[in-house]
Image (spheres, helix red, strand yellow):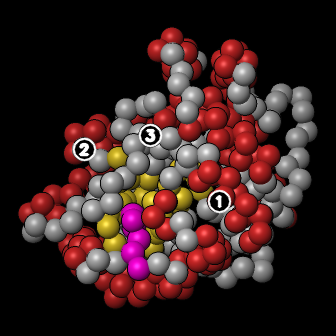
Amino acid sequence: MTSLPDDGLCLGGNVFGWTADEPTSHALLDAFVDAGGRMIDTADSYMARAEGNSGGESETVIGNWLARTGRRDDVVIATKVGSWEQRKGLRPENIRAACDDSLRRLQTDHIDLYYAHRDDPDTPQEDYVAAFDELVRAGKVRAVGASNFDADRLACALELADKHDLTRFSAVQPHYNLVERDYERDLAPLVEREGLVCYPYFGLAKGFLTGKYRAGQDTVDSGASSGAMAGARAEGARAYLDDHGVAVLGVLDEIAAAHDVPVAAVSLAWLAAQPTVGAPIASGRTLQQLGEILPAVSLQLSDDELRRLSDV
């Protein structure tokens, strides 16, 4: 089984083949791995929703990078099944076919961490738990995870795996960051009790925790995406700009200045320091944006700094 990273940063591949073209994506991957990054997160559905795309673009870009660089042994690759319209749901036959498709696009013989992208209430849990176990036993997958699962359904899946001696989920991928803390209420205690690892997405709260969006500023993320998707992202980030959000940014600014690092790196370092979190997921569509999050790989916040951020 792959040893899953329990520190540092996970590079989100959602931008590859979308807002970052293939040459830029390869440059981002080179820079990330050269800086000590190990884990890359993608999905078969990335980025099917973007104009001109159909899905599988991110995996294809990563696969071409692996073929060009020969750095397969230097990285842990996580991908997902279940959300893409062409391979939707967790029926066993769909999981098998989607895995083979991902392996082909990634140009590799195994996936280090294979997630159920979201739960599938229309498929019996014992069926998809057994299907993931089959892939592990076949050597196509090293570990399996659950993304966007609630605590009750995750607990049930773990119980089924243990009861039937099948591969259990060893990682989760929830929505979790400094200003979105629902994960801590129900899911985190289960993850800690069961010895799982958390790789949270939206670690920068749609860009808000980069410090780019400020009260009284009409920030436009030019080039980040196009049309409605760009507007929705900016609107989502600005939604945090209430008194609470402004207070969070104030503490982030102080700590970032003390360490001489970008605000984004402090936000991710707080997340990485939380119980159960292995590595937060964050992406950058340019080398400049990547440079703002890379310090999180090694940034260590003091207990007082972590407490101040948690409290605010």
> How far is disc 3 from disc 1 in space, using C-alphas?
18 Å
Is residue 205 found left or right of 128 in the rendered image?
right
Name the quarter where the C terminus is drawn. top right
Q: Which residue is mark 3?
A: 7
The quadrant where residue 120 appears: bottom left
Write the residue at 33% across / 54% down. Answer: 3
Report the amino acid beneath label 3: Asp
Question: For mark 1, what is the residue?
Answer: 29
The answer to if 112 sits in the magenta stretch is yes
Amino acid carrying mark 1 in the image: Leu
Q: Nearer the viewer, mark 2 or mark 1?
A: 1
Q: Is residue 308 left or right of residue 156?
A: right
Task: Kindly report the distance in space between the C-alpha atoms of the residues bearing marks 2 and 1.
Answer: 30 Å
Q: Relative to residue 191, is residue 308 drawn left or right? A: right
User: On screen, 141 above or below 249?
Assistant: below
Residue 75, label in figure:
none
Q: Tag 2: residue type?
A: Gly
Are discs 3 and 1 less than 8 Å apart at CB? no
Instruction: Note whether residue 62 is visible.
Output: no
Which range of residues does the magenta coloring cover?
A: 109-116
The one nearer the camera, 15 or 215, is: 15
Residue 14's quadrant in the figure? bottom right
Mark in front: 2 vs 3: 3
Q: Closer to the N terminus: mark 2 or mark 3? A: 3
The one of 264 and 1 positioned closer to us in this rendering: 1
> Which residue shows up at 51% across the image and 16% down it?
302
